[in-house]
Image (spheres, rainbow, N blue to C red):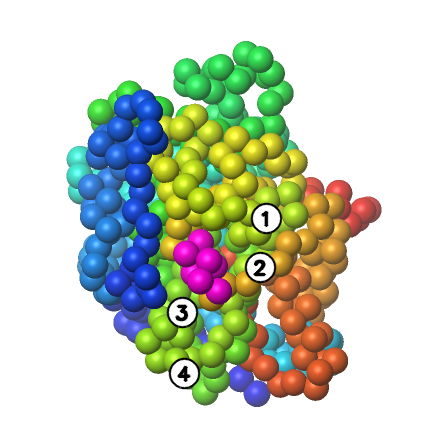
Amino acid sequence: MRRQVNLRVEEMPRRWYNILPDLPEPLPPPRDPEEGESRLAALPEMLLAECLKQDSSTQNWIDIPDGLGELYAQAGRPRPLFRALNLEKRLDTPARLYYKAEFYSPTGSHKVNTAVAQCYYARQEGYERVTTETGAGQWGTALAYAASLVGLKCTVYWVRAVYDWKHDRRNFMHLLGAEVNASPSPKTDFGRSLYEKDPNHPGSLGIAISEGLEDARRDPKAVYCLGSVLNHVLIHQTIIGLEARKQFEMFDDYPDVMISCLGGGSNFGGFVLPFVRDVLKEGKKIRFIAAQSEVAPNLQAEYRYNFADHAEITPLLKMYTLGHKAEMKPIRADGLRYHGCAPILSLLRHLGYIETVAYPADERYVFERARTFIQAEGYLPAPESAYSIACAIDEALKCREAGESKTIAFNISGHGFMDMQGYREVLGLP
């Protein structure tokens, strides 16, 4: 029985998918707060012109430039889709389990898909440096990698709670040439306001975003790059789902359930949105499930306008949010610890197309599920991807109880080779 499908480089998608024109109702636009300076007017000072153009594009398909396609190939695209036969056997389930292997990337995650795109455009637009935030460290590493490929400098503001324990990933970013700062940091006015009150402040993605934005705004040769949430990021990530659609055709199968972890929404959106199109345009029936942590269950919160960052530099976005100043306990899957969800995914959740499940904050449940996957399939997932695996296993066990033979697809967004301390602490490994 076939265990995997690999596409050739020449079969790699040459266009990204933009769901914006296909949404069942218009996406609520970003807006300014009632008081203060215009955040919308400031966006061209902070973000790439091409990415802002893509954010509001009404075209279903956006061409991937040839030069960027070459960077994708260098970064190991296309990536395999695996049939998890050993896991199916171990679970004794009639379900068919498939996982997309986004961990096959130079930095170990899906984040490279938009990092190389944004750095490619930054170079074209004449910038010399990119700034950003990172939570688990995967996005910061990806942007450092992409910047090194095209000859840009890179500055990363890393959530302190993770910066303090992921020493090897920090060294990896340094090896790629990036400047890495624990956030909140004394490097920016906003970061300093928090750092001086508490030098051990654990930080958050919202705080780190504020620092990256402030840094870029004060340097005309720098531009801020975001790793999740905005439409252009989800567009770039649809290369995951577009590849998966071709691969399912080659498996002669099609998903009944699609699952991925969700913090801001980049890997979840990239994996499922091409299939959401099938639901919206062709009447297909698929359940889409976002696996989250109880410390940041943003899709179970309020659907309203909110800032994307702690310092209120960004425009207000209509999204499911816990509040931009919400305090969230650090976890080992810190990439999931974000207060809001991408506006496009939030709208789809609001309209009933996306389900969500939130797992306990101690993470033992999801890491035990990841251990089952590791022992059956042999791949070590990132802590965030453990949530995707846990949800897929839960759904497969429901199929066993009901005697249903469903096709369950899940995305493993990254590997865990630099996260063993987290596994050791949560599972009590010797």
The answer to whether mark 3 and mark 2 are in CB contact below 8 A is no
Q: Is residue 275 above or below residue 58?
A: below
Q: How dense is the environment of label 3, judged by Cα within 10 Å: few (below 14), some, or many (20 and up)?
A: many
Label 2 – label 1 distance at C-alpha: 8 Å
Which residue carries the number 3 mark?
276
User: Which region of the structure is painted magenta?
Assistant: 346-352
State the image quarter where residue 272 is shown.
Answer: bottom left
Label 3 – label 4 distance at C-alpha: 16 Å
The reply, left or right, for residue 99 in relation to residue 150 is right
Q: Which mark is residue 322?
A: none
Determine if the magenta segment contains residue 350: yes
Q: Is residue 401 above or below residue 180?
A: below
Amino acid type of the residue that numbered disc 4 sits on in the rendered structure: Glu
The answer to whether mark 4 and mark 1 are in CB contact below 8 A is no
Identify the secondary structure beneath mark 4: helix
Which residue carries the number 2 mark?
356
Identify the secondary structure beneath mark 2: strand
Label 4 – label 1 distance at C-alpha: 34 Å
Amino acid type of the residue that numbered disc 3 sits on in the rendered structure: Val
Amino acid type of the residue that numbered disc 2 sits on in the rendered structure: Thr
